[in-house]
Amino acid sequence: ISSTDAGSKKAFLSHINEQIEMKGEFYWTVLGSGKHGLSLASDGDVLRRLRENMEERGCQLVAMSMFSEPLDYSMKQTRQMFARCKNCDVTEFTKKLEFDSREYWRGQLDYFLYNTGEIKSYNTTVKVKDAITKLREHYDLVLLDGKADIFKEILKVTGWKSADGEEIVAAEVNN
């Protein structure tokens, strides 16, 4: 279930609530929360309810977030903004950024906490503490993009074996 494919946050939450309402049905479900997805500053209860429901059904929920290197993230976001700037040359784009940067710029911390919703104007230290709390409360796996083999990390958390039968040492809380 993809938040981007759902087209709106309301539609995405409706799909998640359908999952929560299911009783006794067992199958793989992957939720991708990107654009139109969860805002962890306000939607943590959705993950909590989903986890409780999955555990009641004898399933396991693995909540994961992947962050990019800050420079990679900034460059990607700048390229996307430039692509949206119709018929701009570099000089026009630079001027547009000077005037509209608050409207377009959303760092990883704000995206993680508020997704595409309204960004709260808290002190950065408060936002970081809030994000760390949300990660501890709701997430099983947090990765830095390109710094880990995502499949091996998921196998560590779930305790499953790889397709080639390779045994992966189970993760501990501090891993």
Image (cartoon, helix red, strand yellow):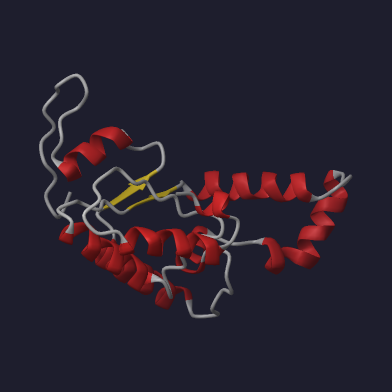
Query: To which quarter of the image does residue 22 belong?
Result: bottom left
Figure quadrant of residue 148: top left
Residue drawn 56% across and 56% down?
35
Locate residue 123, reporting x and y percent: 48, 79
User: x, y (%) of residue 131?
Assistant: 37, 68
Horizontal side of 169 relative to 59 (left or right) equals left
- Residue lying at 35% horizontally and 58% vertically, measured from the top left: 19
Residue lying at the far top of the rendered structure: 164
8 lies above or below 169? below
Residue at 60% from the left image edge and 56% from the top image edge: 7
Q: Is residue 56 left or right of residue 67?
A: left
Q: Position of residue 72 (x, y in %)?
A: 54, 43
> How many numbered marks appear?
0
Query: Against 117, is 71 above or below?
Result: above
User: In the image shown, does 92 or 158 lie closer to the viewer?
Assistant: 158
- Given residues 139 and 69, the one toward you in this image is 139
- Residue at horizontal 69 percent and vertical 68 percent from the top: 102
| Residue 58 visible (yes or no) | yes
Judge whether residue 135 can be spotted in this image.
no
Q: From the viewer's perspective, tell me whether residue 121 is left or right of residue 51.
A: right
Image spot of residue 108 (x, y percent)? 50, 58
Foreground residue, 60 or 119?
A: 60
Q: Hey, which quadrant is residue 132 in on the image?
A: bottom left
